[in-house]
Image (tube, helix red, strand yellow):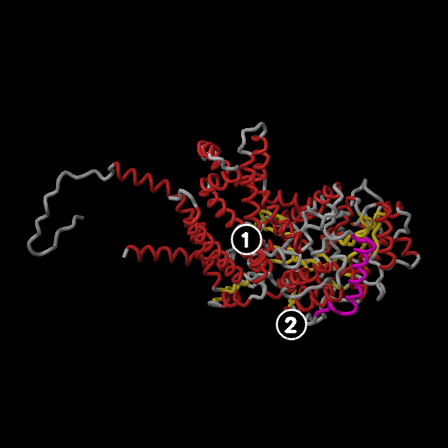
Amino acid sequence: MKTGKGLAVVAAALAGVVALSACGGGEAKDTGPASLRMTVWSANEAHLKLFNEIADEYRKSHPNVAEIKFDPIPFETYTTTLTTQIAGGNAPDLAWVLENSAPDFVASGALLPLDDTIKKAEGYRYDDLSPATLKLWQNDGKLYAYPFSTSPFGVFVNTDLIKKAGQKTPAELMAAGQWNWENALATASATQQATGKAGLVIRDFDYKTWDNLASFWTGWGAQAWSADGKSCGFASPEMVEAMTTLHKAIFTAKALPGPGTTADFFAGDAAMTITQISRASLLKDDGFAWDLVPLPAGPKGPYSVIGQAGLGVMKKSRHADVAADFLAFFTNPTNSAKLAQFFPPPRQSLLTAENLAKTNPKLKPEQLQKVVIEGITNGVVKPTHAGQAELSQQVRAGLDPLWKPDADVKAVLDGVCAKIQPLLAK
Amino acid sequence: MTRTDTRVGPVEARPALGPARPFWTSRRRDQLTGYLFVTPQLLGSVVFVILPLILVVWYSLHEWNVLAGTFDFVGTDNYRALAADPNLGAVLRATGLFSVGLVVLNLGLALLLAVLLNQKLRGTILFRTVFFSPVVVSLVAWTIVWGFLLQDNGGVNGLLDTMGVDGPNWLRGEGTAMLSVIVVQAFKNVGLNMVLFLAALQGVPAELYEAAEMDGASRMRQFRRITVPLISPTILLTSIITVVGSLQVFAQIAVLTQGGPGASTTVLVYYLYQQAFQFHHFGYGATLSIMLFVIVLALTVLQWQMRKRWVFHES
């Protein structure tokens, strides 16, 4: 009898814990003063300073909000950490969502629909948002995350290093109508040989984050998968040609640092880097002379690739309504203009070189026009797909044999398709 | 209000009782003290070991979509998926390779160092400290530093270059990546096993060596016939600790190789992490962790049973 009672107590305790764990907690709405937490990928001081300034401004007119905290999570583990927080019942109130996990977050119902709140917000001008930038973040006609940053990839150039190597700068090549991948890689290779520094770095790629290579292969008209997401594109002739060029650039011309070799452009270790303008904050005032130019033209002509990040409210937030209201304030026309210095906004009215120049003192209007505005207008978004984490892992493992000097490019790319086609077909 | 006895019939005479014994006898006090001492550990075991274990079994019977917030009972579906998982063979091979490599390298090196540093020579204390110091260093910091050293243009290849050797790209080659992870982990913990072996070696009576020498036994024979049998309980302990630790390796893989190149360093715990936290298959991740638990338990029991064959003076 005693044993039976003991078991009953343990079972009851277990049931309680299981129920709590399964629910993940945090579903109960809290009516007290709100403390909001927003996860972000950046720990950059300049970014956080601006975020906090906007949050302080909001709190002045909203005494019901006790605190707004920005919680930086390293970029490399951002989505995994965010998911773990959600699983552990510690979901943030607002979350920055990277484009590669947008389909999963938007379709899952994890995020609160934002239309009603932001359309009603005073002076918000919802119609000002470029419809093209909203596509990735909509489901069944509802907006689940605000496309906070729509940032085209460009090429930052260390002009000191290129001149030291006796090469024409990308600006000079552009003026001569010769800014294409052939010349860009030749410049990178020559600079590497002359200076011993790296030629061109595709930032954050590191032979693992392969979706950043879209900034390269799109110039050949290649795609990771078809527009409907059903067919693999890695074995296409365009992709084989692009990856063959890249392979030669790495292992023959040494235009890019090889696998296992790191070089930080912003520390002066490389002639050029492909990245987004939000990284301009890493440039030091007393550093080297630099320039920002669009991606070189590929065999299929000029092109642009965009990385996007959305800002959403977690449905499980205890203060979801307050969080949505803060999101509307954070992204209203006034604050979007401030944030535009790092994160190009989806607002059409702000996407003029004149406007962006006001908040981007480091960038010239012509740079903003060519790289940012024309990039957003003509660009394609990096590859995104439902279940992208699993797909990414398979592509990464499939591409690993490519990063050897004697790789058979076509065979490796066929192997990638063999790995991911079953996942795409699901 | 007082209660009255309402029972009908003759009241049974109670046996005569002696003087009431005090409740707080010294025996009871000792028992309570004992229970109080073990309570924190007992609570810790229940809350942090037994309960999570039961929960993991429970989760393995469910499909848990964290983003959608759904938690559906699927019975043994995850176990059937485990049996049919095409990646599992490669994962178990990588896990086995890592475990065998680590156990051989770590225990071999630890024993060699312990024997060398058990000599009465100047400087042995300094060397003992040097070899033990990685044990107290943060695992992630240690691994990050090794990550830099093992890069293509890193310190290890720089050193090889000065000797005229063109080193491989350690973390990018399918064979060298696993070797690198094993070496990094072995160097991290070799000091701990070395200290345990040193303590055991110092417990071996010197007279046995003196007698063996008088009988003309070589140093190697003394080592095999005297040292190894007498320190065999410590060898058993270190091998159990090292085998269990090797099956749970994660941080080194996450920092150094992320399971690559290909899937050559995707060991079981890293695969479990990928399934649960990257691909959001939490139910399947729980199933993998049950399998890991069973493997660790089986190997530990096996080692414990095997002790009867080779552990000397095992009581």
Does residue A363 show up magenta in the picture?
A: no
> Dot 1: what SS?
loop
Q: Nearer the viewer, residue A353 or A371?
A: A371
Does the magenta stretch mainly form a helix, a strand or a loop? helix
Residue that appears at 70% across and 46% down: A44
Q: Position of residue B276 (x, y in %)?
A: 56, 59
Residue range in magenta is: A232-256
Does residue A245 show up magenta in the picture?
A: yes
Give the chain letter at badge 1: A
The alpha-carbon separation of the residues under discs 1 and 2 comes to 34 Å
Q: Position of residue B53 (x, y in %)?
A: 45, 55
Residue B4 shown left or right of residue A284 in the figure: left
Residue A312 shown left or right of residue B226 in the figure: right
Q: Nearer the viewer, residue A84 or B61?
A: B61
Q: Position of residue B140 (x, y in %)?
A: 61, 45
> Dot 2: what SS?
loop
Residue that appears at 57% across and 62% down: B89
Look at label 2 and name its amino acid: Ala
In the rendered image, is residue B46 in sight? yes
Vertical placement of A232 versus B229: above or below? below
**Residue under label 1:** A90
Give the chain letter at badge 2: A
- Image quarter of residue A424: bottom right
Q: Earlier in the sequence, mark 1 or mark 2?
A: 1
